[in-house]
Amino acid sequence: MESSYPTQLELSFNEAARLLIVEDDRDTLEMLTLYFSGEGYFVTTARTGTEALEAATHEPGFDVVLLDLFIPDIGGLEVLAEIARHAPGPSVILLTAMADKEIAHDALRLGAFDYILKPYNLAQVESSVVACLAHRDYLKQSWWQRLALKPAS
């Protein structure tokens, strides 16, 4: 039986990617944590903006942050802006139920890699994480390696 999801790009990273999942809804946080842990990611969680910034500061080395837009004490856009100030830092994927073009534009302007609307399916979120990791890997290459990877026209 064929899957209805597109085939995932298989990437060979040297070690498990490190995710910080920031979500105030306990069930959603548990679902994301179980899913990504089961897929081989190293997962740390936070339920508030303050916890997210403490984790990002005291546990450097996260590759990707899955960040809910509406979290207690410090909002998602403020957390995103603070994370972006500490370059090179983790890439951020915003998860939100708010379908607002202005907020999405602000998030991308502040450096978010993606903006995913709830309700989402886990394969959609993982596809964004895989694309984000591939992009981070690409940016780590020197300019001449990037040129060598470009297809001939």
Image (tube, rainbow, N blue to C red):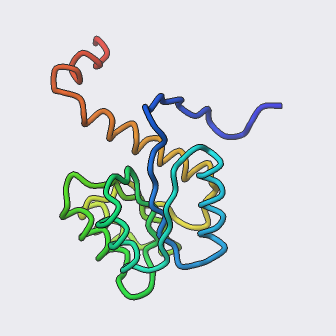
- Which residue is the extreme one toward the top? 152
- The residue lying at 33 percent from left, 35 percent from top is 137
The spot of residue 18 in percent (x, y) is: 44, 50
Judge left or right: residue 127 versus residue 111. Answer: right
The spot of residue 14 in percent (x, y) is: 43, 31
Judge left or right: residue 67 versus residue 5. Answer: left
- Which residue is the extreme one toward the front? 58
Q: Nearer the viewer, residue 5 or 57?
A: 57
Q: Is residue 9 above or below residue 21?
A: above
- The residue lying at 44 percent from left, 86 percent from top is 72
**Res 153 → quadrant:** top left
The spot of residue 92 in percent (x, y) is: 37, 58
**Res 81 → quadrant:** bottom left
- Which residue is the extreme one toward the bottom? 73
Name the quadrant of the N terminus: top right
- The residue lying at 53 percent from left, 44 percent from top is 127
- The residue lying at 34 percent from left, 73 percent from top is 54
The spot of residue 73 in percent (x, y) is: 38, 88
Q: Is residue 119 above or below residue 130?
A: below
Judge left or right: residue 2 versus residue 48. Answer: right
- Which residue is the extreme one toward the right? 1
Q: Nearer the viewer, residue 87 or 81?
A: 87
Judge left or right: residue 80 versus residue 52. Answer: left
Number of dots carrying numbers: 0
